Amino acid sequence: MSGEHPIIRVEHAVKKFGHFTAVDDVSLRVEAGQILGLLGANGAGKTTLIKLILGLEALDGGDVFVFDERPSRASRARLGYVPQGLGLYSDLTVRQNIDFVAGAFGVAEPPEAPEAIAAAGGRLVGDVGLGVQRRLAFYCALLHAPELLVLDEPTSGVDPLARARLWDTIHQQAETGAGVLVTTHYMQEAEQCDDLLLMSHGRKVAAGTEAEITAGTKVVEVSTPSWVAAFDALSAAGLPVTLAGRVVRVAGLERAQIDEVLAAASVPATVRDVPATLEEKMVLADRPESAP
Amino acid sequence: MSVRPAAGGWGAEGCTVRFTSARGVVTALSDISLAVPRGQVTAVVGGDGAGKTTLLRVLAGRVTPGSGRVSAPDAHDMGFMPSASGVWRELTVDENLEFVGRAYGVRGARLAARRRTLLERADLLDAADRLSGRLSGGMRQKLGFCLAMIHEPELLILDEPSTGVDPVSRVELWRMIAETAATGRAVVMSTTYLDEAERVASVLVLDGGYALYAGDPRNIGSAVPGCVVRGAAAVVAGQAAWRRGPETHAWFAAEVPAGSEGVADPDMEDAVIALTLAHDARAADPRAAT
């Protein structure tokens, strides 16, 4: 996807806090109708990047355009934002929160609220369940029909059915032409995004579809009844070992190296190459010796 | 559901817990059973309000169920990591270990040995002098794990150890959890992440205090009543449908409708959503219960 007028265009963005570079030469585009997932460890720079796009932080280098302009109050009026903490006023009622947001965006008649929200209208936000709070935050972010939706960890702590309902809403927005930028820790949500951008230590380490990102990363799967011994031997050798059930996986190394370690530890095992997961790609990207 | 606590482990059987709140009586757990055998990781899965924390607190003896039985070791043979990690933020990493160790009678040479082993495994040795409040979320959760393990408990209870933890730290935490089970201890953890639940030996899926599924996570697909479908019928299924990226999946209480393709072995994500819908349908119309 590369339209003439992407909704978000970030070019070589840099943001420093003192000597710490939080965002280091990151470029991205979000087109109309596209869902871009921003993945990365804590401290990878995801939230800072979002703040640059919202105009809440000033750039130290590069450029950011939203709707073809630098972030401003005008661009803010055309986007909907759900922050990690949901951004609601917990000491106001549900109704007052809606009125406040509608007033701020100049919406005279907000769309009809879903029943769960309408039913809680007179209650303080702090007194309603987290599930209703989250739906309220989404409703408030969408009531001015934004052309861009920015979501920071929208589904953390949500049960699978409620999470599916939130993703239904996100897909509906994209299908009506909105661009969506969403951060997540939840690797399984990657499948809900059209494209992904992986960040580590402020840098972009990979971008593309899930298949494009994991392609070219070698993972060796070690199956053995003595999986504990295999796990210990490979960990002791300093290799990036993970467990999937009782199967041991090692990312980013050749089979021969694994065979060698297992042979030295006298652990009999079946060893084969398998496709990498996004999580493994991320762990490899985060290892200091694999700087891009 | 009648999972008896295995001879080689602990657990809860037929436990019901009700709380009285401003909104009336809330059933936090409804006839819940959970076996926590030694040598493996058992996971309790569900969203906020599913009853995960209540169940773990029942196992830890911190909540007494209105009915049901609990089998657990003495407090000094149990490690409990609360969802906020249980770390003292005003103390350094070392001070935390010393403070919690003392509460369990771990001191002197044993404390020094435990400290070294645990911090090494958690990759926290370099952070030993740091104030815990200044650690990253992932490091703090790993420290919380070390604190719960300081006295080498027989039963380790972890309440959402990985929530809000970045993927890289999650892998490290997971490694520590798996190693602990591998040394023969019983480990039970709660999580909102289904990919974690897929890795454990046994899983209990909770929704609103009810058990949707209990058993081997690999068999959850076959526990779904009716069927999960993709294709034309799914797209028009309304509230029974959900998106999986470019695809729409849906749950039907009966057989696969004409013109649609059944999802042969629903994965955990599809299965939990379908089981939740099936449970909601039964609750709405008890006569339809089978």
Image (cartoon, rainbow, N blue to C red):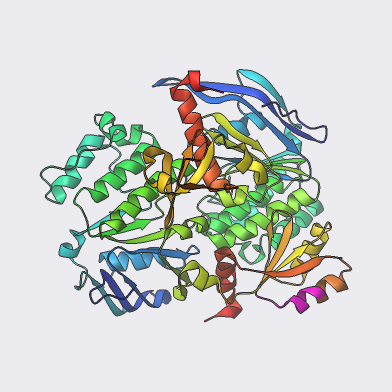
- Against A255, is A134 above or below? above
**Magenta stretch, residue numbers:** A252-259
| SS assignment for the magenta stretch, majority | helix
The answer to whether residue B131 shows anywhere in this view is no
Question: Could you say which is closer to the camera, residue B236 or residue A106?
Answer: B236
On the image, the x and y values in percent for residue B9 come to: 78, 35
On the image, the x and y values in percent for residue A112 come to: 20, 38
Q: Is residue A48 magenta?
A: no
- Against A40, is A113 above or below? above
The answer to whether residue A7 shows anywhere in this view is yes
For residue A88, what is the image quadrant? top left
For residue B33, what is the image quadrant? top right
**Residue at left 17%, top 41%?**
A99
**Residue at left 41%, top 48%?**
B232
For residue B14, what is the image quadrant? top right
Q: Which residue is situated farthest in the right direction here?
A: A266
Query: For this view, does B95 lie left or right of residue B105?
Result: left
Q: Quadrant of the N terminus of chain A?
A: bottom left
Query: For this view, does A178 lie left or right of residue A228?
Result: left
On the image, the x and y values in percent for residue A75 come to: 19, 64
- Against B152, is A266 above or below? below
